[in-house]
Image (cartoon, rainbow, N blue to C red):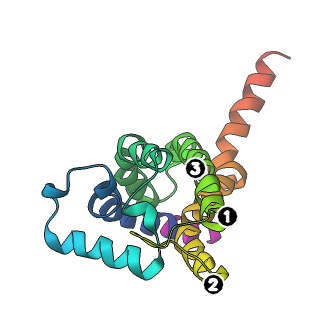
Amino acid sequence: MCTRILEVIFFFYFASHIPITLFIDLQALLPAEIYPQGLKDLLHWYAAEFKDPMMLDPPVWFKSFIFCEALVQMPFFPIAAYAFWKGDCRWIRTPAIVYSAHVATTLIPILSYVLFHQFPTAPHPGPQTPTERLTLVTVYAPYLLIPIMLLFTMVFSPEYSSHIQGRESATAKKFQ
């Protein structure tokens, strides 16, 4: 039962990530002309409201993370959404481990940057106060916490790891 609840959470995470990536995150990489004004306005509202200048004027290292999101993660999102919607798809284990380790690793420098970088106040103001920094951290935190939950589920849940252990014990019996 607990694993099924986690699978539903993972489904919503991956399903929601598709439009967020296509309509918001990729604006940092793709030409502005391809996006309708409403989506550009949404991005500017978000950046102003949450003081996230990285989305309007991304540093090169941040662009590299978005590039990975576009080329590596985006193709995985619908596959993962399907697997977790269906549930008990053990074949998703290894790709989910790779995905979760990759994303968790990228979030550490992003969160460190948000917490410790001295952001300018213009042209795109970043967080200046501890409250503003923590507010922006709360925007990015789910993209660290859910992949960590996914990693632990894939590694420690008997529903996803028991067939691996069974295969190892069968292999061990052959060599005894």
Query: Which residue is painted at 31% across and 71% down in the image?
Result: 43
Residue where numbered disc 1 is placed = 116
Q: In the rendered image, is residue 130 in sight?
A: yes
- In space, the residues marked 1 and 2 are separated at their CA atoms by 13 Å
The quadrant in which the C terminus is found is top right
Which element type, helix, strand or loop, lies under badge 3? helix
Q: Earlier in the sequence, mark 3 or mark 1?
A: 3
Q: Alpha-carbon neighbours of circle 1 within 10 Å: few (<14), some, or many (≥20)?
A: few
Q: Which mark is residue 131?
A: 2
- Residue 138 shown left or right of residue 122 in the figure: right
Percent position of residue 93, x then y = 56, 45
Q: Which residue lies most toward the top here?
A: 175
Percent position of residue 84, x then y = 46, 59
Q: Alpha-carbon neighbours of circle 3 within 10 Å: few (<14), some, or many (≥20)?
A: some
Residue where numbered disc 3 is placed = 106
Which element type, helix, strand or loop, lies under badge 2? helix
Query: Which residue is painted at 35% across and 46% down in the image?
Result: 70
Give the mark toward the camera: 3 or 1: 1
Give the mark toward the camera: 3 or 2: 2
Percent position of residue 146, x then y = 58, 64
> Which amino acid lies under the numbered mark 2 shown in the image of this protein?
Thr
Work out whether residue 116 or residue 147 is closer to the camera in this orientation and state it: 116
Work out whether residue 3 or residue 55 is closer to the camera in this orientation and state it: 55
Q: Alpha-carbon neighbours of circle 2 within 10 Å: few (<14), some, or many (≥20)?
A: few
Q: Which residue lies most toward the right here?
A: 176
Work out whether residue 18 or residue 30 is closer to the camera in this orientation and state it: 30
